[in-house]
Amino acid sequence: MNTLWRALDVRPDEVRAVVLTFCYVALAVAGFLLAKPIRNGLFLAEYGAYSLVYAYIAVPLVLTAALPLYEAVSARVGRRAGVTGSLLFFGLNVLAFWWGFRRPGGAESLSGVFYVWVNCFGVVVPVQAWSFASSVFDARQARRLFGVIGSGASAGAIIGGLLARELARRIGTVNLLLVLAAIIFLAAVVVNLAWAERKRTPQTAARRPPLSLGDAITVVRRSRYLTALALMVFIVAIVTQWTQFQFSLVASARWVGNPDRLTRLFGTFNLAMGVVAFVIQITATGPALRRYGVGATVLLLPIALFSGSLLTLIWPLFWAVGLTNAFDQGLRFSIDKATFELLYLPLPSHVKSGVKGAIDVLVSRLGDGVGGLLLGLATQGFAFGMVDVPGLGLGLRGLAAACAVACGVWMLLALTLRRGYVSAITDSLQQYRLDIERAAAASMDRSASTVLATAFDSGDPDAILYVLKAYAQSGRRPPLEAVRPLLTHDVAAVRARALAALRAAPDLTIRAEAERLLHDPDIEVRTEALLWLADHAKVDPLVQIDALGDFEDFSIRASIVALYSRPGRYQNLEAARILLAAMANEKGSQGRRARVEAAMLLGRLSGDEGAELADLASLVADDDPEVAAAAVAAAARASRLDLVAAVASCLANDAIRRAAHDALTAFGPPALPSLEQIVDAIATPAVVRREIPDVVARIGTDEGARFLVDHLLETDVTLRLRFIGALATLRARHPEIAVDRGAIEMVLMAEVMGHYRSYQILGTLTSPLQSTDPVAVALETSMRYEVERIFRLMAIRWPRFDVESAYVGVMAQDARVRANALEFLEAVLKPQVRTLVLPLLDPQVTREERVRLANQVLGTRVDTHEDAVLALLASTDPWLRSCGAYAIGALGLTRLAPELDRLADDPDPLLRETVAHARARLAGEESAVAEPLEPPIVDAPHLHQAWASSADEMGVG
């Protein structure tokens, strides 16, 4: 049995749900396809084929009246009770029909009502079954399992056809209704068992209530994809109805007035088509969906019916009509039905159930009604009492021609859906991404506001200054409503810092407060107020100083330097130089404000004039973060390219990293040669090198793109991630900039192969190590970064697709979102890429399966612990080499002790310390065993829930 499930690609944890869902679908379809021959035999024997048009029109009218009532009851009692109750209701109906048909003259009065009832039953019950299947399995599972589950429909067709064929002759058509009632009651039992299994399925996302019928119709109207899907369902209803009518027409012509013979005919046909559909379902549906996707399988049925209609048009004979109906039933209950269910899977769960009901029930039955009306007008018309509406008198050829035209429209809509399916998945992923980003931002703002409010309420000035400083360093805008009250705080430093935050925000509503603070007793507060007015109220500082008359010290000197530096009658560069040099050389915290003002003044001057007045480089290297930040901004404003290296060194300082980023970006393309020299210099600190790619991305230009592409294979894995992310950012911001796609694909394949190699190593090492062991943790963390690099490279290679949202989806906790993300990648990636990438991302592929695939892809194996450790030691990343060294000690691999000797003098301090630890472990020192060294993540960027591609998002500052 296990071999059978493996052959069908069913996982052990899915077996019970698959079996129960299979049985539920089989019983639903068996009931309908047993009812159909009974319906056809009784109706055609009583009224003839041309009277079917009245039944076709009556069905949507009845459903329109009944469905709102069913929806209201289900909303009150719940979906489970609603489905079970409807099945019990239908079963009791069948018993009532059986009793009615057995009465004298019952067949004459009930056959028309029963025909309409069967059609309503055939709408509600199979749709309920497939809706249940869609709610249990996600898009990736559906690709694998809907072929197996859909074979339940084929099995149901076999059961229904076999019962109709064998029992109609033995017990009669009417008594078959008792068998039908038994099947319906059994379906009610199975669905309750299946529902209990569904409840055991973990639900990772909060459930939202399903849409009402009115809201579902609104959603369909507003979505181009759903509108096209609804139109296709409408056309399908008409085509299949007309196809079945042609079969009823030729059948009733052969066996007029013989209900048992007609029932046997339709039962035999259903049996044969059930067998065909079952074989197709088991052997072809799953592989076709996995290999070709819905884009191809959605076209199979319209092409087949188009071909059958052409045959009937040429040879209007029984066999041609029968073949066309064989195409219809053989494919509709196998590949086409599974495809249709997949078309709904990109929709959110709360939207899908409502929309699916609106389309599958209302739109399909509306198609039946319109099709019946058109069919009557195309054939013999209608007779309403004394009023006759003549028809066109079309025969088999005319109907076949009309069906061929409708199939052409069907194929056009299928092609539209083929493109819209990917767009629908993209939209769902984008919506999910936006939702989590909004939630994260809201949570962050609420948390920040809470922290600030708590600090403010506590009255602790140190806590308030810490929060305000954190906002300034991160570059994020603080909650202004929490900062404004700080302008009246008792501590001058808090008032000054709050005013600086509101100036940077900017908050333009505090002009009156800024003017009031010009009279503050603290000079720093007065200076901040003057700066706010100068920046946002366009007030001349000299005029304001003259009007107030109480400014002193550096504020007056700064104003005088600004005046003396301007060309004109007051220009005096010598005096400006003396004053500015004095300000720039003031020491300590008391002179901090003077140095800040000196730096800001130098930024307002040209490079040559600034160089003559004071040494800006010394201010860039100032120990005070505020002074250095003002100096690096001044260097960029004055276009001092000679200071690019000095400004870049500030990237190592957390307090001024944001300012250094902004300054280097402001230098623009002329700074790129200097930045490349800094990256290539061996002496450049790693933290500085890792920040430069984001600067290059913000600068943009073709030269910047070439710079980034040239460094995509950096040996430092964190730096490589930064370069890949920066190139993705540049491409997103400047899609007009071309990159070498061949080079990107080469790097992508290198990353993919490296990820497969990591699985080989992990698969070999985790057997002797626990999952919490430092080596296992380090390897898994490294592999998460490998996945991020793979996605960033795919985003560069395929920029017109939203690969960023797919990354968010793959990392989501919600299984359905992950499945949609994988489905999206399946549709947009090149075959040779998706064949390698998707198994690495699909959570339904086990680690063991990935290791086996890695052995096939790489052509080599990592069979022993020594092989795995040597692979780690061969890495160019010091962190992974440290993992290898640690594993030598943890696993007691004494044969690899010479490798530790080779690494003992490595320049990397972490690696040297890990080697010493491993040697101690091999020597059996208890202290080493008791306190193992855990290789940390060295300066690696955080994996974000949202796609972090810009400099702001990559942790800058």
Image (spheres, helix red, strand yellow):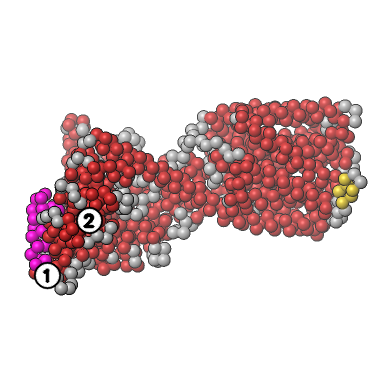
Is residue 72 or residue 735 the one in the foreground? 72
SS class of the residue under badge 1? helix
Q: Is residue 513 above or below residue 9?
A: below
Q: CA distance from mark 1 to mark 2?
A: 24 Å
As drawn, the label of residue 531 is 2
Label drawn at residue 180: none
Q: Which corner quadrant of the image does residue 596 belong to?
A: bottom left
Q: Main secondary structure of the magenta part?
A: helix
Residue depicted at x 78% and y 58%: 401
42 relative position to 439: left or right: right
Task: Identify which residue, 336 or 543, lies in the foreground.
Answer: 543
* Quadrant of image for the N terminus: top right
Residues shaded magenta = 575-597
Where in the figure is residue 854, as x and y percent of width and height? 41, 48
Q: Is residue 673 magenta?
A: no
- Nearest to N terminus: mark 1 or mark 2: 2
For residue 473, say whether it is visible.
Answer: no
Q: Where is residue 607 drawn, in percent x and y?
A: 18, 68
Query: Mark 2 is on which residue type?
Result: Leu
Q: Is residue 535 visible?
A: yes
Residue that protrudes farthest toward the right in the picture:
386
Name which residue type carries label 1: Leu
Q: Position of residue 267 (x, y in %)?
A: 78, 38
The residue singled out by tag 1 in the image is: 573
Judging depth in this view, the residue of 831 and 514 nearest the camera is: 514
